[in-house]
Image (cartoon, coloured by chain):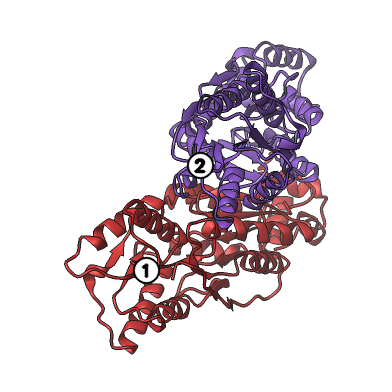
Chain colours: A red, B purple
Amino acid sequence: MGSIHEVAKHAGVSVATVSRVINNSTRVTEKTKSRVDKAIEELNYEPSILGRNLRTSESKLILVLLPSVANPFYTEIISGIEDTAISRGYHILLCETDSNPEREAIYFNLIRKHVADGVISMDPTVNKERLAELSADHPIVQCSEYDEEGTIPHVTIDNELAAYQAVKHLIKLGQERIALINSDEKFLYARERRRGYEKALVEYGLAVKKEWIYNANKLEFQSGQLAVRNLLSQGEKPTAIFAVSDIFAIGALKEMNIKGMRVPEDMAIIGFDKVSFSNMTHPPLTTVAQPMYRMGSISADMIINKICGKEVESIILDHELIIRDST
Amino acid sequence: MGSIHEVAKHAGVSVATVSRVINNSTRVTEKTKSRVDKAIEELNYEPSILGRNLRTSESKLILVLLPSVANPFYTEIISGIEDTAISRGYHILLCETDSNPEREAIYFNLIRKHVADGVISMDPTVNKERLAELSADHPIVQCSEYDEEGTIPHVTIDNELAAYQAVKHLIKLGQERIALINSDEKFLYARERRRGYEKALVEYGLAVKKEWIYNANKLEFQSGQLAVRNLLSQGEKPTAIFAVSDIFAIGALKEMNIKGMRVPEDMAIIGFDKVSFSNMTHPPLTTVAQPMYRMGSISADMIINKICGKEVESIILDHELIIRDST
């Protein structure tokens, strides 16, 4: 995409004349207008709506789309994004989509209007068609969640493998009745982590029981509490829980505390993410650490490279099992 | 503040003519110009710099400045801001300032460029002169923190009274040796809460001891842990702690757990904010609830009213002491 200066040079007119054409001024002859239009087409120049009268079309801003700032999983990623963006002369605008397509559309429009130069999408429910359409013309990368069939560069971890290893850790400790507290399986990570959970059980000849798989509606502590109440009401009770989020695991742990039951003796619990307060619980939570800061930092590098016109490739980062006292 | 359409109607000219006057076009007679200028003045119309050639100058976006998304205190406020903003046709852009004046300046520029219509500032360290300067020309409100000497409308709670009541609660339980874990006193809320702490002690004839006042550098769990280590190393040890943030209180509680000491028997602990995690601790934390969602909702109403040219006034909301098992 050329600049307004290149268009002017190409058409042999002043920048002011190009601006007049773009703004449909009547003070331009038909001949000049068609010359400028041709230059715009040949250079594939897209005038920014808001920037039409600005000297530069770069905002040095990056939009970061995330479903909710209340999820501490994102806060460390944001830290990584910001530090790297700032070191490269960019700033970020956080957009909380609440997984709502209407909000998404509004934020996507900011890109179309060139308010920002590029997007890092962390929203697992982002409309894929819309994202693909936007990515054709604008720099976009995905962080954490991504589109399995899509072509948008992304940075993520191997969720299936991480879940498989977490469940294997429980099995190695002698656990045979292992429940899963999962998110809504409309999310890719939830489907991948369930696959890892089932793979480990099957590999060790353990039963995959439907009653032991609890899908939470909302990512909040209360969902973990509800899950434990549900699991303990089963005829055959599980003795261990793999929760796909520390939030669920902390809620589960809380409910065990309330019931006066011991963790890990009565119920071993393992979470996912290693959010900052996973170490503040009683007992501290075993969890799968995602390299959140690095994910953020790498995705900032990816989007800035893309803005600068460089080729970027998807990256899968390593996770790590952090064994504490809850298992 | 009127719209360009109202100005045109008021002056009896077309919108295009108003636009020409604003842009100092030579194609307007002196007579027309003075008529338009008069209408602009009477309607108190402020033309947008970037929007000068746009049909509408409203972006329907609100900037929200906050020091850190990692502080869960802000997430519920953001929820309130978003719900109210959206119900009134606005969306928000979150800007994490990290209390860094350079970042602040970049986000303030977005307002000057009319990328957004107004600002809700929650940053306690925002540059006051810059904020006052910006507020002369642009809609700004402050939420939670505010400038004591300033004229910017704000929504907050009575921090001194809340702290006073929290400490009084400890005194009524028989506590006489009460420590304070405070934030850096460059923050207004930290100074106000310290005043409330001291006021309660003095009123009940208890000593205000310098060694029992711990000022944390950073708002993180570890600061609460460090504070407890420091307080327990004193010759005369406190038996109760008032922490100005749940984050500090949760860290303090954790450190007591690690040391095998009991809460509240060996140390009563009270926090501030009622963040969602404050109920997940062991034992659950006594805390001062701020009406965070309402603060957010009201500040959104305030800024939108200001954008629409209405007068708005500062509001002080009620807090509430939530007594749980840590005291």
List the residue tagged with mark 2.
B265
Mark 2 belongs to which subunit?
B
Q: Residue at x 58, y 78 (%)?
A: A318
| Image spot of residue A131 (x, y percent) | 50, 62
Residue A265 disc label: 1
| Image spot of residue A224 (x, y percent) | 36, 57
Residue mark closest to the camera, 1 vs 2? 2
In terms of image quadrants, where is residue A64? bottom right
Q: CA distance from mark 1 to mark 2?
A: 26 Å
Q: Answer whether labels 1 and 2 touch (C-beta < 8 Å).
A: no
**Does B316 sit above or below residue A44?**
above
Amino acid at pointer 1 = Glu
Residue A126 disc label: none
| Image spot of residue B242 (x, y percent) | 60, 35
Q: Residue at x 80, y 48 (%)?
A: A55
| Image spot of residue B318 (x, y percent) | 51, 22
Determine the secondary structure under disc 2: loop
